[in-house]
Image (cartoon, helix red, strand yellow):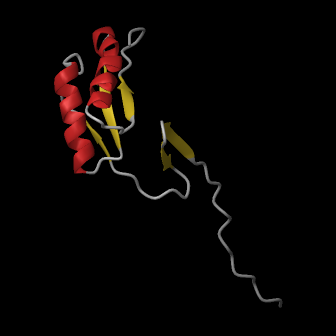
Amino acid sequence: PQPIESAAPKARRSRQASVVWGPRIVTVGGDAPVRVQSMTNTDTVDAIGTAIQVKELAIAGSEMVRITVNTPEAAAQVPYIREQLDRMGIDVPLIGDFHYYGPHV
């Protein structure tokens, strides 16, 4: 009888994406390193409070920060949150955590 060949795992198909914000590039997925991300627990309608918490998370080491976008009012504040962060010199990418409730955002 012939010897049985050892089974080698198939090469993993890698999907990698880049989050690009200005000169900052954060790769995610595939062979990218594990990234530190956090999520705020503020009401996103409070643009100043959310921006302050994002700043604190970025200073603590978060490479990306998620914010809840669960109402049209919260969505309307996102540009103001980014504006506040830019004024504070915080260039961390924001990720919208959208909540879907049936036909409503």
| Residue drawn at (21%, 27%) of the image | 50
Q: Is residue 16 left or right of residue 83?
A: right
Is residue 53 something that shows in the picture?
Answer: yes
Q: Is residue 28 left or right of residue 58?
A: right
Q: Position of residue 15 (x, y in %)?
A: 60, 48
Name the quadrant containing residue 66: top left
Q: Is residue 16 left or right of residue 95?
A: right
- Give 15 or 80, whichever is nearer the viewer: 80
Is residue 43 something that shows in the picture?
Answer: no
| Residue drawn at (25%, 33%) of the image | 88
Q: Position of residue 40 (x, y in %)?
A: 23, 34
Name the quadrant containing residue 71: top left
| Residue drawn at (30%, 47%) of the image | 62
| Residue drawn at (28%, 9%) of the image | 73
Q: Quadrant of the C terminus?
A: top left
Q: Position of residue 23 (x, y in %)?
A: 49, 41
Name the quadrant containing residue 57: top left
- Work out whether 75 lies above or below 67: above
